[in-house]
Image (cartoon, rainbow, N blue to C red):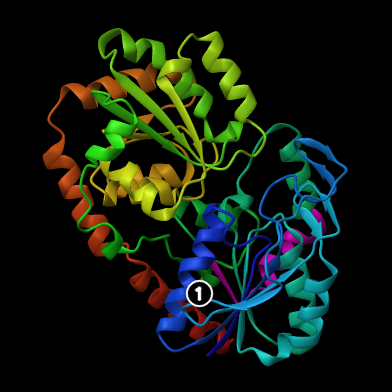
Amino acid sequence: MKILQVVERFYPRAGGAELHVFYVSRELAKLGHDVTVVTSSSVAQQDVPGLSNKGLTLRNSLPNLPRYEVNGDGVKIYRFRPRLALYTLYVVPGLIRYLFNHLQEYDVVHVHQYLHAEPSLVFITSKLTKTPFVLTAHDMISSYGGFRELIKKCADAAFGRIVLRSAAALIALTPINREQYLQLGAPEGRISIVPNGITPEDFRNLKTSSQLLQDLANPEHLVLFVGRLVSYKGPQYIVQAIADVLQEYPSTKFVFIGQDDGYGVELVRLAASERVSDSCIFTGQVSDEKLKEFYATADVFVLPSSCEAFGIAALESIAAGTPVVLADLGGLSYILSEIGGYPIGMGANVSKQIATAIKTVFSNDVEKDIEKQRHKVLQDYSWTNITKQLITVYEGALTR
């Protein structure tokens, strides 16, 4: 098949949707399909002039990425310059032109995220070219509350429901995600559940890195957070839990890995006010190899995110043999119920719950449980298996 993937941002942006498209495209190419990714050149929340939930951005700070390239897996990538941002809607003239001029060349188009401009653009151009499209909403179909909830309701009414009804197929990452589609009136028969995955060979032979521990001043315990530094991912709750943990385990380091999307300064201030700065390490984004070292060396991984479609980082942590403490919400609830981990209720006393869960991991023999979870992830959640499920969905879309 000739397959077009459309997503607002792409690798090296390190978000869930971006990584999903990266790995799925790679696997599709390995299986002999002709794959093209069309995206913008943005990699951060505020590198495009306009308005975001972080405020007004006046200057362009886009990275110098190639407009066109073919990566090592044979995936063709087109990046177009965004001109204006309005929350999750990017104005990308080059991407619009590409869809109108080239969509008819593809057998199927797979568009990602929901409250973005791309699904509506694909919907319009697919109508003109009779090209079937598949949609994966990722976390953008969730309910948020507050002002973001108002934006979502406006988007649902303006374009969301018609896009969902018009898709040849809809991909839900979890059963919860499937229910969110149904609540918006999506046709039940067109929804398939296809979760995120990992690359098993990257995690089979990982070991604790003594060099990494040495670089961190040889802490007795290591707690890991991996995710973009934004408030809804919950790193602030971890910072607020540190003092409690240090009372019993004073030689513990807390490592925060991820791109700063404008919340990093606030986290540093919070760590200072909590008097735990010496126990916090903010690395920014790290290489894939370094990330795997951290996964394998950490004693526990914590992700108290209030809005997570799935949680690839949690899956990767389990694959590396590290126990997970997760918010019992959204896609993370799916991981907790289907694979395992320590749940955190996000209603009240979140930091206290995190501290208790971390100390429980430190004080108990969890090796047997995590090895069972690790085996399940390596066996059932490979990107190869996930991609084969997607191909079945694509083939079904072609017959509608």
Residue 284 rendering spot, x and y as whole percentages: 53, 39
Residue 56 rendering spot, x and y as whole percentages: 85, 38
Q: Secondary structure at mark 1?
A: helix
Tell me the residue at 47%/71% (across/down): 24
Which stretch appears magenta?
Answer: 157-171
Tell me the residue at 78%/61% (across/down): 159
- The question of residue 160 being in magenta is answered with yes
Please name the residue that numbered disc 1 is placed on.
25
With 20 as the anchor, is 5 left or right in this view? right
Q: Is residue 44 above or below residue 256?
A: below
Hey, which quadrant is residue 108 in on the image? bottom right
Q: Is residue 391 above or below residue 260?
A: below
Say which of 254 and 50 sits in front. Answer: 254
Residue 306 rendering spot, x and y as whole percentages: 53, 35
Q: Is residue 193 above or below residue 37?
A: above
Residue 194 rendering spot, x and y as whole percentages: 43, 65
Tell me the residue at 68%/92% (across/down): 105
Q: Is residue 341 visible to the viewer in this orientation of the structure?
A: no
Main secondary structure of the magenta stretch: helix
Quarter of the image containing the C terminus? bottom right
Say which of 321 and 151 sits in front. Answer: 321
Tell me the residue at 67%/49% (across/down): 44
Q: Is residue 173 visible to the viewer in this orientation of the structure?
A: yes
- The question of residue 375 being in magenta is answered with no
For the residue carrying disc 1, how many other residues have a C-alpha within 10 Å: few (<14), some (14-19), or many (20+)? many
Q: Is residue 208 above or below residue 166?
A: above
Say which of 322 and 294 sits in front. Answer: 294
The three-letter amino acid code for the residue at tag 1 is Ser
